Amino acid sequence: MIRTLLAACLAVATVLADTPPAWAQDEAAVQDTDIDALLARMTLDEKIGQLVQRMGGRSKSLNSRLGPEELDKVRRGEVGSYLHVAGAEPLRELQRVAVEESRLGIPLLFSMDVVHGYRTIFPVPLAMAASWDPDAAERHARIAAREASAAGLHWTFAPMVDIARDPRWGRIVEGAGEDPYLGSRMAAAQVRGFQGDDLAEADTIIAGTKHFGAYGAAEGGRDYAGADVGERTLRETYLAPFRAAAEAGTASYMTAFNAVDGVPTTGNAALLRTTLREEWGWNGLLLSDWRAVEELMAHGVAGSREDAARLALEASVDMDMVADVYALDLKRAIETDPGLIPLLDQAVRRVLETKRKLGLFEDPYQYHDIAREAEVILSDLHRRAAREIAQESIVLLKNEGNVLPLAKDAKRIALVGALADDALSQLGSWRAQGRAEDVVTLRAALEAAHSDVVFASGTDTRADDVQGLPEAVAAAEGADLVVLALGEDFDWSGEARSRSSLELPGRQRELFEALAATGKPLVVVLMGGRPLAIPEVAERADAVLQTWLLGIEAGPAIVATLFGESNPGGKLPASFPRATGQVPVNYDHLPSGRPADPDPSKDTARYMDQPITPLYAFGHGLSYTSFDYGEIVVDKNEIPAAGGSLTLTIPVTNSGPVRGDEVVQLYMRDPVASVSRPVMQLRGFRRVGLRAGETNILTFTLESEQFALWAAEGGWKVEPGEIELMVGAASDDIRQRVTVRISGETAGTIAPAAIETLSTVSAGVEP
Ligand code: NOJ
C-alpha cells in the first residue's frame, strides 16, 4: 500500500516537477551519522514520543499543565515538544528533566504562537502587510525571535501566510491579505527575521509557516470550511507564499485544518508528500494543526484513530499537535502495517534534525538565559520599533479638504468611541505575552499630546446599547473637531471569528450618523482586523484613517499621524467591499466574456445594486503629499522566454509640500494566453521615502519566469506573446503602461508570485 503510494507520488512529481530550491538540495546531501546512531538506539515507543506535541498550558495560562504526571511522560520519552509554554527558568527545568532524566536525553522543542510579537506587540499581520515594507516585517520578526528565544522558546507558529480574499473569514487578520506577490514578500521576510542566519544561535527560532495549503479559501469565509479551488488557483495564488517561505528556508510548516477539493490537508499525501516534499524538495518539520489528525475522522476520511494516524503519517505529517493520536494509536497502526516503519523513521529523523539545527544537542540550555530574558523583553529599542512599524501600517483612506493633518494649535477635540480607550484590543487576537498595561491607547496618547480633549465612549462596540449617544453628541457639539474611533475589537477577528456581515458591529453606525449630523469636521479612525463595508463612513466622514490593531504603540502612532508628524504611507493589502454581498472583490480577478460595465442596462458581470468597483481598491492609500510618475523606460522590448530578463525604470517625484512615502506598484497583464489570465497581477513594489520636491528613479528587474502560468496540462509555462506592464500608486490608479514581448516558450520552475522582483532606488533630479 505504502509502496504504491510512494510510487504514485513520485510519478506525479516527475510530471509536475517544481524544481527544489538550491538549499534543499544541499540539505539532502548532509548525512548525519549522529542522528543515524541515535535512531538506531530508539525503541518504537521512543520514536513515537518524538512525534508528540503536548500542551504545557492553554494559550492564556502557559505552563499550567506541567505537573508531576507530565514530567513522568517526559522522563519516559513520550513527548517531543510542548506548546503554550514560556519562561527561561521553568523551561530550563523542563528541559533538564528531558535531557538528564530520560533514557536517551533527547531535548524538547518549546513552541508558541508568536505571531506579531512576544511581549512587545507589533501591529497585527494584516496591518504590517499594509506597510508594504518587507524590511519592517523582517525587523518585527527578528525582535519577536529575540524576545521569544530569551523566554526559552525555539519555535513560533508564524508567519501565517494564508491568502484571504473573503474578509468574512476572521483569520484574514493574521495574514498579508489578498495578494500572492505581496503575501510572498511578507512571508519570506518574516521567515528571515525569525530564523536569522543561523538557527543554532541562541536568539533565533524556527518559523512555523502556516497553514499549508488553502486554508484561506475556506468556503463562504467560514473558518475550517473546505476549499474548492482549481489546481491553477491553488498553485498560483494559495501556495505561492508557502513556496516563498520555502525559498527563504522555513524550517517548519503547519498543515491547515480544512480540506482542499474534498481531501483534508492533514491527510493529503498528494499535497504534502508529493507537492511540498517531492516536488519542492522541502525536508523540514511538518506539524499538524491543533487536533487536526484526530479531526480526519470528523472529516469522514478516517474510520478510527488508528486510520487517522496512518493517513497523517503517510501524508508526511511529522508531529501531531495535542490530539495524542500518534501517542496512543500510531503504534497499533504500525503493528498492523509494518510498511509504515520507514515513514515513521523519516518523521523521527526530521524532528531530530530540527533539534540539531537549533543547536539543542550541543547545548540544550542555551535558550534559557534569565539575564537575557530580563534585558531584551520589552526593551526601549523594541518599543521604538513597534511605534515605527505601527506608523508605517496606517492607511489614509480619505482626506477631503485636507482636514488632516490637524493643526498643532487645534482647539477642542472630541474623541469618541470605546475603541479609542480599549488597550486590550490593540494587542489583536494572538497576543503571546503582550499585556494590556503595555499599550498606549489613542485616548492616552491624544490626551498627552493635546491640552483640550473631551472623551466620550458613545456605544459599546458590540452591545445593543445607545445610552452613551447623547453624551457623545454633546461632546461633539462642544468641540471644534471630532475624532471618532469605529470598527471591531480584537475578538471580532481571528480564529473562529467569521462574520456574515462586514458592517460596523453593534450600534456604531448610529453613533456615526449622530456625529455626522452635528456638522463638525469628522475624522474617523477605523480599527479592526478585517476590511469592513463602510460606504456611509466613506461618504460622509471628512477623513478616514485605517489603523487596524496596531500593538502597544497604537496610540502614539495614530496621534503622530493625526498631527502630521508622521505622514501616512500604507496601502491596502486587501480590497474593501461596498457591501458584504460584493465579496470576494479581489483586484486580480479573471476577465469575463462580458466584463463588468458601469451601465446597469447592459448584461455584464456585475451586481445590479452596486457600482462595479470596490469601495477602496487593493493598493489604495493616500498621503499628505502627492506623487508624480514620469515616463517608463524599459531596456528591452522583447525578451526570450528562457532566461530572459528586463529592467524597467521610472522616476517618481514628491510634488507636494511635505516629506512622504510612496509605494510604487508594478502590475502585469498577459492579454492573450492559452488560459484566461487575471486582469492584473502585482509583480513588484517598492516603498520609497521622498522629501518635498525630491525625485527618485526606481528600477525593477523582472525575469521571464515571472510571467509564467500554470498550464492547462499542468506545470509552469512561459508562453510567447505580449505582456503589459503597469506602474502606479494603487491597483485602480495606474499611471504608466508599457508593452513588451516574450519570444519562444519554456517551462517555468516555481510559482511566479513567489519570485522576488529586485528593485533599486537612486537619486533623481533635485528641485
Ligand atoms: C490552532 C490555530 O489554527 C493555529 O494557527 C495555532 O498555531 C494553533 N491552534 C496553536 O495555538
Image (spheres, grey):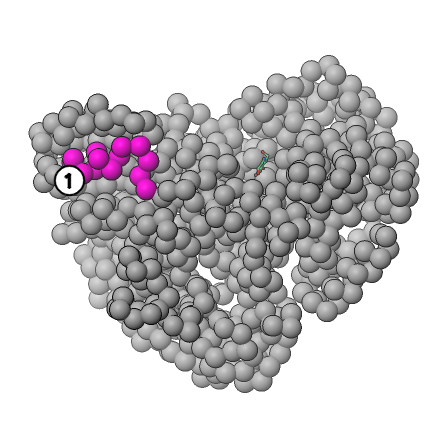
Residue 125 visible in the current orientation: no
Whether 396 is drawn above or below 525: the answer is: below
- Residue at (36, 54) in percent of width and height: 582
Count of numbered circles on the image: 1
Q: Does the magenta stretch include residue 513?
A: yes
Q: What element carries label 1?
A: helix
Quarter of the view holding residue 248? bottom right
Q: Give the range drawn in magenta.
A: 503-516
Q: Residue furthest top?
A: 68
Residue 424 percent across, percent down from the top left? 39, 27
Name the side, left or right, on which 621 lies relative to 52: left
Residue 537 percent across, percent down from the top left? 23, 45
Residue 632 percent across, percent down from the top left? 35, 76
The residue that label 1 is drawn on is: 516
Assign ligand 1 to one image quadrant.
Answer: top right
Quarter of the view holding residue 587? bottom left
Is residue 370 or residue 104 the one in the foreground? Answer: 104
Is residue 103 or residue 54 the one in the foreground? Answer: 54
Name the side, left or right, on which 547 lies relative to 699: left
Name the side, left or right, on which 530 lies relative to 433: left
Name the side, left or right, on which 273 lies relative to 720: right
Whether 3 is drawn above or below 750: the answer is: above
Is residue 90 or residue 743 the one in the foreground? Answer: 743
Whether 743 is drawn above or below 68: the answer is: below
Q: What is the three-letter code of the residue carrying label 1?
A: Ala
Whether 377 is drawn above or below 342: the answer is: above
Residue 698 percent across, percent down from the top left? 38, 67
Is residue 703 or residue 471 the one in the foreground? Answer: 471
Q: Magenta stretch mostly in which secondary structure?
A: helix
Residue 521 visible in the current orientation: yes
- Residue at (37, 66) in percent of width and height: 605
- Residue at (46, 44) in percent of width and height: 169
